[in-house]
Image (tube, rainbow, N blue to C red):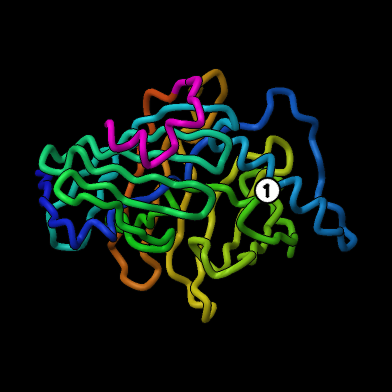
Amino acid sequence: MLRNKARSPGQWGYLVGACLFLGLATTGASAQQVPSEPVDDSYARSIVEKADQVRFPSEGFQVDVSIVTSKADEESESRKFRVLSKGNENTVVMVTEPASERGQIILMRGRDLWVFMPEVSQPVRISLSQRLTGQVANGDLARANFAGDYNPRIVRNETIGGEDYAVLELIAVDRSVTYQKVMYWVNTKNFWPLKAEFYSLSNRLLKKASYEEFKKMAGKVRPTRMVMEDALRGGEKSVLDYDGMKLRDLPDHVFTKEYLKKL
């Protein structure tokens, strides 16, 4: 049985974020092999950029996200969000379930995040790394711009299931991003992401994620499920399911504090 737990405004600082979102590489992308010799960072960055495009569109879009969190010996918790995003830098996240939290909205502009609550007159500043729900941080749902947030390099290549993958180390450009280091597996043929590992500033493994259920959404094949597992406590995970993605013309004024007050 799923159980929704109402949260107070003070707890909302942990409730916001962006997905590690979805997408797809351009159809017909040419196959590329990871060079055996050391490569410059521009090649690694091109892989990360194409994987970003695989996870979610660069155009304006809308998607509904359901997050179910489970822990050992506890009932599952379910939450739902509607996300509006444009150009990797602007995102609005609206709570749709539970009903007790409808009206709570997150605004992301660049790496700046605010949460709006009906019962609080002024928006509250929050961080990308704060917990949204379960294993999901704000930045996992509101911002998935790996190419803009990290400096990448290829550390090796691996063959998994007969497919070639580049294994990239992503180092945060500064401390404001969601994680300080990410290890990232990307298919070198179609640039589909396979999995990721997320690390703290002290290089401690925090979470593991897998990208699954590739299906056509918004005109392209994209991963429609992301599973995030706690690397420190076994048996704790959050499953993010993406549905109803569609391209939308979203004017810039949608991503302003003044506009959100109207919502």
Query: Relative to 82, is 219 above or below?
Result: above
Query: Relative to 166, is 83 above or below?
Result: above
Which quarter of the figure has residue 58?
top right
Left or right for 194, reference 49? left
Query: Relative to 257, is 70 above or below?
Result: below
Q: Give the range drawn in magenta.
A: 246-263
| Residue 144 locus on image (x, y percent) | 52, 47
| Residue 197 locus on image (x, y percent) | 52, 62
In front: 229, or 114? 114
Q: Residue furthest bottom?
A: 202
In front: 71, or 161? 71
Which quarter of the figure has residue 19?
top left
Left or right for 60, reference 141? right
Q: Where is the C terminus found, in terms of image quarters?
A: top left
Q: Count neighbours of disc 1 (C-alpha within 10 A) and say few if under 14, some if 14 to 19, many if 20 or more.
A: many
Residue at image location 14% in from the left, 48% down from the top:
119
Residue at image location 38% in from the left, 50% down from the top:
17
| Residue 23 locus on image (x, y percent) | 55, 34
Q: How many numbered tags mark residues here?
A: 1
Query: Relative to 100, is 248 above or below?
Result: above
Residue at image location 42% in from the left, 31% down from the top:
254
Q: Where is the N terminus found, in terms of image quarters?
A: top left
Q: What residue is pinned by disc 1?
A: 48
Left or right for 224, reference 133? right
Residue at image location 39% in from the left, 39% down from the top:
92
| Residue 112 locus on image (x, y percent) | 47, 54
Give the amino acid at mark 1: Val
Question: Any magenta on residue 262?
Answer: yes
Question: Any magenta on residue 153?
Answer: no
Dot 1 lies on which element? helix
